[in-house]
Amino acid sequence: MKKYSVLIGVVISSVLMIIAISVYPGGSMYNEYSVGFDWKHNFISNLFGTRALNGAENASRIWACAGMILFPLSYAMFFINMAKKIPDRNSAYIIKYVGIANVLFTFLTVTAWHDLMLIISTSLFWTCLFIITVFILKTRLHLFKVLCLICLAIFYYSVYLWGISDWDLLPITQKINFLTSTLLILGLEYFTKKEDFAHIKSRGYKELVGNNK
């Protein structure tokens, strides 16, 4: 059961978010009178309000909040497991503890501090994935090299859209970013092993060897 904890957490979280989306009353920044959740125009954050954008009581809130508790916990378990595979101790510490800290900030995105917490949580989350990508690029895991770079490109493109306030494409890229990063995490969790990184010498090891020469 422990082996599949990340997968189980992601599946349960996804089910909770799907339920939240299915019961969302309606309303978006483009049309406050729309009915239901519009995948093209609604942001995931619309699910967290006490009231939907059309003014109705938001039945999706409780489901979305529950999902947003389990998702970061699942990601934290992944970062803890991934840190054990990384040979560099300092990098492993960053991945592990930043990944754990991200749980709190991600959950706080459902509060009135959404904008600030979103910036902090995404910065922490993608810092971990960036470090992991650096090590993936040093392995023979060629498929994951491509997938990591694609995910990073989608993320930075989303940041660019946010920076220029392109609200037409941002709701779509948000969901693509969320989906691709989650699939990448599951792939790295279950299809990589410590031996894939064993040939990469840690910084501390290199310094020790250098001092002994």
Image (cartoon, rainbow, N blue to C red):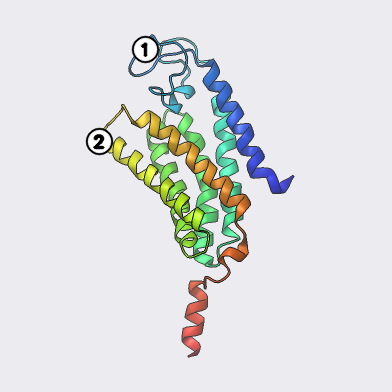
Residue that mark 2 sits on: 164
- What's the distance in space between the residues labelled 1 and 2, CA to CA? 23 Å
Residue shown at 59% from the left, 61% from the top: 85
Q: Is residue 108 left or right of residue 85?
A: left
The vertical placement of 192 against 177, above or below, is below
Measured from the top left, where is residue 148 in percent x and y? 46, 51
Label 2 is placed on what type of residue? Ile
Q: Residue 189: x, y in percent?
A: 60, 50
Q: Is 43 in front, or is 144?
A: 144
Q: Amino acid at mark 1?
A: Glu
| Towards the viewer: 33 or 59 | 33
Q: Position of residue 170 (x, y in %)?
A: 35, 31
Q: Which residue is mark 1?
A: 32
Quadrant where the N terminus lies?
Answer: top right
Residue 127 in the figure: left or right of residue 192: left
Mark 1 neighbour density, 10 Å: few (under 14) some (14–19) many (20 or more): few
Compared across the picture, whether 205 is left or right of 28 comes to right
